[in-house]
Amino acid sequence: MSIKTVAVLPFGIDDKNDARLGALLGMCRGAGVDVVMLDSLTLPEERRGICVADDVPDGVELIITLGGDGSVLYAAEKALPLGVPVLGINTGRVGYLAEISGDDMGSLGDILHGGYEVDERMMLTAEIRSGGRVTTLRPALNDYVVTKSSAAKIAGISLSCRSGGDVYDAGKFDADGVIFATPTGSTAYSMSAGGPLVDPSIDCICVTPICPHSVMSRPSIYSTRFVIECEAGDWRRSALELSRDGMETVELAAGAVVTVRKSEFRTKLVRVRTGGFTGVFRSKMTGR
């Protein structure tokens, strides 16, 4: 079934990307698809006659981003309330989450006519318990990262897992921090820190220490039945901070406990490529 209305989220509009945006809007008009722009600030003046909204309005069936993986992460947050799928058009360098290239948007016509599938990706949610208060963060598609707030110091990290009424010691180590990643996020910061690559069709939590000061502190994969707790180790009371998908960072007060678990929300990503997880990953990493 053809799509009637899309929301477009452009990032980093320059002369080249403005031409891509023009091509995108032209294809939408040619297919009889209405367009809502989610960010007018990045638009050249001549594009600002398009309908603009701060949030995804009712009736939008697809969000299209122009940018890199960061734009897909941002759009995924916008899409959550309505469960709208996201299509990434890559204008960055790698763009692992983006489905099609900004230099080859030929498949967009088929997508606008309903020629695509949707991958549902697991997300994480996190809470901060501090001083008797509980703060819930927005869901993460890639990861939550706990790091030291001072470059000159080492963070002491203490991890535990809960399942039902049982609590398990999951390790204590000195490091620059620790990454809690989804399978989708396993190809992002977690991979750079030596974490495992996980097929995004699998639901699990990847826990990757960042530059650990022990050869025994290795990346681990946990079932989503576990709730993982993280706090500053009592042997090294370092100041810590928590970031979500690289977009939001909060300082953690002394004694704060971060709880990470599987979110009830899932992100829907448009897929038209074949080749499976390993094939697409290899293509992105090698450029072939």
Image (cartoon, helix red, strand yellow):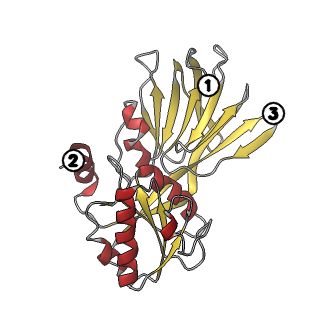
Q: Which residue is mark 2?
A: 287
Category of crowding for the residue at label 2, using alpha-carbon neighbours closer than 10 angstroms: few (below 14), some (14–19), many (at least 20): few
Q: Which residue is mark 3?
A: 131
Q: Which residue is mark 1?
A: 149
Residue 9 is marked as none
What distance separates the C-alpha of mark 3 from that of mark 1?
Answer: 20 Å
Circle 3 sits in a helix, a strand or a loop, which is it?
loop
Q: From the viewer's perspective, is residue 96 above or below residue 246? A: below
User: As drawn, which residue projects farthest toward the left?
Assistant: 288
Q: Contact (CB < 8 A) between labels 3 and 2?
A: no
User: Residue sitting at 21 percent across and 43 percent down?
Assistant: 286
- Disc 1 marks a residue whose amino acid type is Ser
In the image: residue 254, left or right of residue 170: right
What distance separates the C-alpha of mark 3 from that of mark 2?
Answer: 49 Å
In the image: residue 28, left or right of residue 168: left
Q: Contact (CB < 8 A) between labels 3 and 1?
A: no
Q: Quadrant of the N terminus?
A: bottom left
